[in-house]
Amino acid sequence: MNRNLLIILALFATVFAAWPLLAFAGDPLAGAENCRACHPAQYEAWKTGPHGRAKDTLPPEQRKDSRCIGCHSPSQRDGVEQVQCEHCHGNGRYYTKDFIMRDKMLAEAVGLKARDFTTCLQCHQGDTSSIMPFDAKTAWTRLPHSRTGGK
Ligand code: HEC
Ligand code: HEC
Ligand code: HEC
Ligand code: HEC
């Protein structure tokens, strides 16, 4: 094989290997509106549940307060408000294309977290308003979204 071609292939392989890592480099989120057409039931459940309204429950003067929005609307600087799909499912910049979404391994390789209950702890571990310690799988059953999967 031609030596230049080998070098090009090696470079391509390196870039491709680094691609999933780039997905976590703080890119703006795709946003729930981007998921809506393909996942209408999950969108409705989100919109009517606590996460789709998490910014709106803050008193108006605290909707820009960095002490609050870190959990109630972490990506609003990028124009997407509330607790987003992608705060639980991973940044969708690369996985939301139909051909990628249909290939579960590929989708996960470029950032999809399909069922990861550890992501909840980013925001929920400090809960003090309840006497019960936060248990992600129990809490999940309180969300409308827990009834969208049929399993
Ligand atoms: C172009 C259509 C499309 C868009 C846009 C889209 N998805 Fe998907 N998604 C799919 C398809 C198709 C599947 C595979 C469904 C299946 O296999 O039953 C899927 C599967 C999933 C799954 C489940 C994977 C599993 O293992 O069960 C999750 C979670 C998901 N998508 C989240 C999202 C999120 C979050 C967004 C927006 C950031 C999004 N999707 C945008 C089409 C889409
Ligand atoms: C570490 C993450 C985190 C931070 C920071 C945070 N919150 Fe929350 N907040 C939560 C979670 C999780 C809940 C829901 C669970 C609960 O009620 O204990 C919640 C619930 C609430 C509720 C109740 C909402 C309802 O529907 O009853 C209010 C009001 C609220 N927070 C206001 C604030 C304000 C104001 C700030 C900033 C001073 C703030 N939060 C900062 C995570 C956080
Ligand atoms: C980016 C931060 C964030 C993440 C990640 C997150 N939550 Fe929340 N969650 C919140 C906030 C903020 C509220 C309060 C919303 C409001 O203002 O009513 C909340 C409210 C809730 C509530 C309603 C209050 C209650 O305790 O009944 C449940 C249930 C819940 N979350 C479960 C989960 C589960 C399960 C996960 C993971 C699969 C998760 N959350 C991931 C921030 C988050
Ligand atoms: C609070 C975290 C959280 C948010 C916000 C969230 N999801 Fe999920 N989602 C999950 C978890 C956890 C599962 C896996 C549940 C299981 O396997 O029991 C899931 C499952 C799914 C599935 C698989 C099928 C199903 O319904 O169970 C799809 C598709 C999906 N979510 C899309 C979305 C979309 C689109 C949004 C936003 C409109 C969204 N999710 C918002 C945590 C979240």
Image: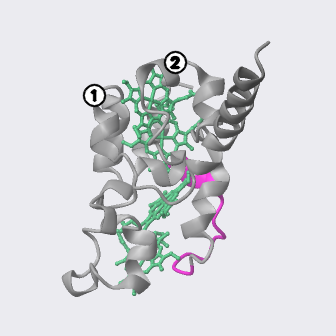
Q: Is residue 6 above or below residue 129?
A: above
Instruction: Identify which residue is drawn at 58% across, 19% down.
Output: 103
Please state which of residues 42 and 27 is positioned toward the viewer in this rendering: 27
The magenta span reads: 128-142
Q: Quadrant of residue 42?
A: top left
Q: Residue 55 location in percent, x, y?
A: 30, 68
- Type of residue at label 1? Ala
Q: Which residue lies furthest to the top in this view?
A: 1
Q: Residue 105 location in percent, x, y?
A: 66, 25
Q: Residue 104 location in percent, x, y?
A: 61, 24
Q: Residue 147 location in percent, x, y?
A: 45, 34
Please state which of residues 148 and 91 is positioned toward the viewer in this rendering: 91
In magenta segment, residue 138: yes
Residue ID for mark 2:
102
Which quarter of the image is occupied by the C terminus? top right
Element type at marker 1?
loop
Residue ID for mark 1:
37
Which quarter of the image is occupied by the N terminus? top right
Q: In which quarter of the image is residue 9?
A: top right
Callout 2: CB less than 8 Å from ligand 1: yes
> Could you tell whether 72 is left or right of 140 in the image?
left
Callout 1: CB less than 8 Å from ligand 1: yes
Q: In this view, does 20 lie above or below 40?
A: below
Total number of numbered discs in the rendering:
2
